[in-house]
Image (cartoon, rainbow, N blue to C red):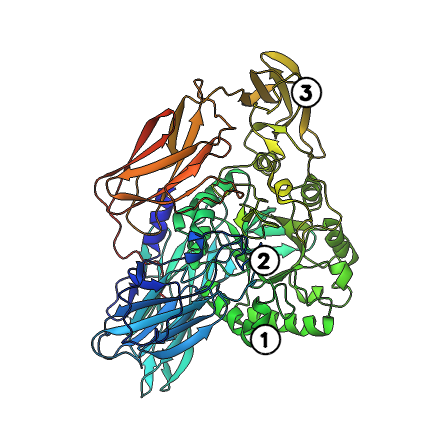
Amino acid sequence: MRRTLLLLLLTALPAASQTRTVTPLDAAWRFTQSDPAGASEASFDDKGWQTVDLPHDWSIAGPVAAENKSGQGGGYFPTGIAWYRKTIPAPAAHKETWIAFDGVMANSDVFCNGKLLGHRPYGYVSFHYDLTGCLHAGANSIAVRTDTSQQPASRWYTGSGINRHVRLISTNAVHIAPWGTFVTTPKVSPDSATVHVRTTVQNDSDKPANVTLTISLQLPNGRFVESFAPYRSKPATIAAHSSADLEAELSIPHPELWDLDHPALHTITASIQGDQEKVPFGIREFHFDPNQGFFLNGKHHKIYGAALHTDAGPFGTAVPLAAWERRLTELRKYGVNAIRTAHNPPAPEFLDLCDRMGFLVMDEMFDAWTVAKNPYDYHLYFRAWSLRDTADSVQRDRNHPSIILWSAGNEIHDTPHPEIAIPILKSLVDTFHKNDPTRPVTQGLFRPNVSHDYEDGLADLLDVIGQNYREQEILKAHADKPTRAIIGTENTHVKEQWVAMRDHPEYSGQFLWTGVDYLGESGHWPAIGAGGGLLLTTSEPRPRAFERQSWWTETPMVKIARRVAPAQKNPTDPGYEAPNQPTATRLTPTLLMDWNPVDTTAHTEKVEVYTNADEVELSWNGTSLGTEKRHRDASPIQFRVPYAAGVLKAVARTAGKIVAEDTLRTAGKPTHLALNVAQRAATPIWDDVVFVTATLLDAENTVVPDSTTVIHFATKGPGRIVAVDNGNLLDHESYLAKQRTVYQGSTQAIVGATAGNGSITLTATTEGLPPVSLTLPTAPSPKNLDPRSF
C-alpha cells in the first residue's frame, strides 16, 4: 500500500520547466476560529493566531454537543466562521501568478493584499484566482474567510475550513489555461489506439502570439516515446488577451490498456513555447449496453459499487491520501470495484488514486437543486452557480480514466415539478456534454414512479438512467423501454437488491449505501454518524462485508457471524428519510463475529455462515452440527447452536475439497495488548500516515470483544499521534486525543512522521496490563511532492 501512495505522488509530478512553477502552499498558515474586523488587510496583526498546516478541518476537533447548530445532519459538530492568512513572496518579473484551491468549506472569500479576489459558496469545487494584478515587491498577504455558520446546511458532515490542498502557480503571459488540456482516446483496440489532445492556450500579453502545441508520450513503464506522428498541432496565432484551442493526435501501436486488473497509466506532456503541462490518462473504451450492461475494453463487468462521503472518520474532511488508499484497499477485498462520490465532487487526489488502483467512479455534482433539503444548503446558490460549478468540476476531472459516469444529482426534490426540473436537467446535461462529450450522464432518481420521471421525459434526458433503491421499478422501466441503459445509483445491503442485479444482465451495477461509515446523518443524539457501511470508520469490516464478499468475489472464503438482532428486511420505500427509531437501535450491531454472548446460561444462538463455496460444515467443540449447501437465493447458511464456551468452526468445501475455514472462540479475560500495522515505514508528508491497531487479547490470543478499557498512546522519536478512532459512532471522545476506549476488542492510533530519519516508537498502555511498543521506521520524503500541475 505504501508503494502505491508514493508512486502516485511521484509519477504525477510536472516535469521541471523553465517557465511554469508549481509551489505547494499548505504549510504554516495563521488560523483563527473567529471573525475579527480587518482580517483581510495586509497590515492586520495575526501573531496571536494559531499556526496550522493545510488541509485543515477545524470542525473535527469538536467538541460534539447536542446544541450545536449542525444538528444530526452535521453529526453535532461545531460550525462557524474562521479565517486563514499566509504571507507569500513576490513572483518573478513578467510572470502570471495564480492561487489554486482544491476546495474550501464553505462560502469562501479570498483576499490578496486586502483586495477581494472572489467568492465561492460550494465547498466541494476547486477554483483559482489570478494574483498577477495585486502582487507587489516584497511580502504579500493572502487571507481566506470561510463560513459554515448558517446551519443546518447539509444532510451529512461537511467539515469547515480550507480542507483541501492549495498551490501557487507561475507561468509566462502566454500559457496553457487552467485545466486546459483534455486527452481523449477516440479509437481503442488491442492493436492500436488513437490519442487526441486538445489544449487551450491563453495569451494574456499585449500582442499576438504564434503558438504550436507539441505533445510527447510517457508509457506506463516510464519510457518516453517521441517518434509517434503526428504529434504537433498546426501553428496558430492567438490575439492579445484571448485564447485558442490547439489540437494534436497520435497513434499508439499495441497499447497497454487501462482496466480494473491492470490500470496502466500513460502521461501526455503538452508543451508550447514557454509552458507545459503533464496529464496522466488511461487508454480504455467503455460503454453501457441497454440489454447487456457495462463493458470495459470489450469485456463485460458488473459494477460492484459503494458510495463514499468525503469525510474519513477521525480526519473529518481533511483526509490524507493514505487514509483513502487504506479504505479502497479494504473495500476491494470484499468485491467493490467502483465508487460513487456521494454527493459531490471529491478531492482531486482521490481520483488520482482511483486511476492508479483500478476503480471505476461515478463523479457526482449535487444533492440539491432549487428545492431545499436543509434551510441553508446548495439550493440557495443553485441558480447562480450550478453551471459554473459543473463546468469547472468536469474540466478538472475529465482526464481521469476511472470516471465512467457524471451524476447530475442525488434524490433531487425538484423532480415532482417537471416544469422546473426538466429545463434544469437539460442545462446540466448540456454542460456535462459540452465540457466532456465522451462520458454519459446519470442521476440518482428520487421516487420516479411518484414524480412520474419515466413518463414525463425527465428520465430519458439521461444517458444512463440511475435510480436509488426500488430495484423492481427500474427493471420495469427498462422492460417498458428496452433502449434504456440502467444502473442502481444507491442500494441497500439486503440480498433482494443484489439478486435483482445478479439475475438481470441489463442491470449494469449498483452502488451500496455505503462503503464506509461516515460522520453526520446520525438520526438522533447521541449518535454522531451513520452506521451503514461495509466498514467501520477504522476500515475494519462489519459482518455484512463478508456476506458481500461471498456474493461479489470468487476467491474461496467462509465467515461465521452470530445474529443478535433481526435481519434488515428489503424495505418497500427505502432510502429517503432517516428511520423514526431510537439511535441505539440504528447503531446497535445486528451481527457479531465473536462467541461471547452476554447471556452465558444455556440457550440457543443463531449463527449465520457466509461463503462462496458449494457447502459448509459447522462444528461446535469438535462435534459436527451438519453440512449445508450454499443457497441460490443468496441467503446465509443458518444454524441454531446450543451455547457453551469453546470453539465454533466452519469448513467450506467445493467439489468435495476444503477451500476455506473460519473459527469463533470464546474469549477469556484480557491478558495482553497487541499492536498491528499493515506497513511500517512513514514519510514526513501530510498525506502519509500509519494506522496502528491496538487489540485486547486473552491468553489464547483471542480478541476480547466486550471490554470498555481505555488505551493510551505515546510516541518517542520523530513522530506524533495524528488521531485516534475506535469505529464507535456513539463515542464522544475527541478524535485528536491520545487515548481511546476499546470497541469490539480494539482501537486505533494514527501516526505521522515529523522527520525522515530515525524511528518512531509507539507505546500503548492500559490499566492492569503490561505496556506494548512498536517501532516504525521513517523514510525521507520525496522532493517536489505536489501532484498537480494546476
Local crowd at mark 2 within 10 Å, few (<14), some, or many (≥20)?
some
Question: Residue 155, labelled with which disc?
Answer: 2
Counting residues from the start of the chain, the first of labels 3 and 1 encountered is 1
- Say left or right for 347 vs 657: left
- Say left or right for 379 vs 696: right
Quarter of the C terminus within the rendering: bottom left
Q: Which one is nearer the viewer's eye here, 93 or 567?
A: 567
Residue 700 found in image quarter? top left
Counting residues from the start of the chain, the first of labels 2 and 1 encountered is 2
Residue 594 found in image quarter? top right
The residue at which mark 3 appears reads as: 604
Local crowd at mark 3 within 10 Å, few (<14), some, or many (≥20)?
few
Nearer the viewer's eye, disc 2 or disc 1?
2
How far apart are labels 3 and 1 at the CA level?
60 Å
Asked if residue 730 can be seen in this view, the reply is yes
The residue at which mark 1 appears reads as: 383
Counting residues from the start of the chain, the first of labels 2 and 3 encountered is 2
Local crowd at mark 1 within 10 Å, few (<14), some, or many (≥20)?
few
Q: Which one is nearer the viewer's eye here, 172 or 675?
A: 675
In the image, residue 52 sits, relative to residue 537, either above or below, namely: below
Residue drawn at (45%, 65%), measured in percent from left and top? Answer: 396
Which SS class for mark 3? strand
Q: Amino acid at mark 2?
A: Arg
